[in-house]
Amino acid sequence: GDITVSDIQMAKESEACIFAFGLKRIDPAMLSLAEAEGVVIRSNDIIYSLLDEAKETLGKYLPPQPVEHIHGRGTIQAIFVVDGDLGEEKVAGLRVMDGFLYKEKSANDLRCHFRVYRNGTLISPESNRVTAASLRKFKEQVQSVRRGEECGLALSGFEDFQEGDEIECYSVEMKSPTL
């Protein structure tokens, strides 16, 4: 049926949008009232188009969801203790087996974190995302290393390395879900 004053009032109170299907004409007074009240009216004669508009509009109300991107993995081949700015720190000497390891941000500009696995079991704290304190190729600080290369990696807040442990570089992107 036609859009009424009460439809507009309910939409305003609930911060909703009005979807109309198959209306030949919307009363100009209702359009003015809706505009004055900040209520959006979507009208369409094609049901699939109206459903697409509804999905797009309703999707904006859903909270963003985390999407994880795995950038690369490396295997620890040796462990070194070096003098750092804050005293001695353990550095994992590793070979990148897959993808890339990034010190701070990935190629798509996402903050990178690290996980450490021993015999397939996660041993680094998941609740406190571990970041890189340093990433070096030989003695030079670098922003990334790629598959087949060797590097030294020190992690902030985690030093319980053993030879054979696997290190995974990942980032988390917050994406709006789709309906």
Image (cartoon, rainbow, N blue to C red):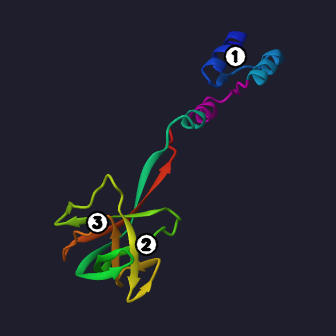
Which residue is at 51% across, 69% downward? 107
| Res 84 → quadrant | bottom left
Q: Which mark is residue 99?
A: none
Left or right, 165 with reference to 61: left
Instruction: Read off the residue under disc 3.
Output: 158
Q: Earlier in the sequence, mark 2 or mark 3?
A: 2
Viewer-nearest of discs 3 and 1: 3
Left or right, 73 with reference to 174: left
Q: Within 10 Å of the Cα at label 3, are there few (<14), some (14-19), or many (20+) other Cα atoms? A: some
| Extent of the magenta region | 38-55
Local SS, label 2: strand
Q: Within 10 Å of the Cα at label 1, are there few (<14), some (14-19), or many (20+) other Cα atoms? A: many
Vertical relation: 41 (above or below) 87? above
Viewer-nearest of discs 2 and 3: 3
The N terminus - image quarter: top right
Q: Which mark is residue 8?
A: 1
Instruction: Read off the residue under disc 2.
Output: 102
- Residue 43 inside the magenta-drawn segment: yes
Residue 117: where, in percent of width, then height?
23, 65
Which residue is at 81% across, 20% downward? 32
- For the residue pair 83 and 147, the one nearer the viewer reads as 83
Vertical relation: 94 (above or below) 114? below
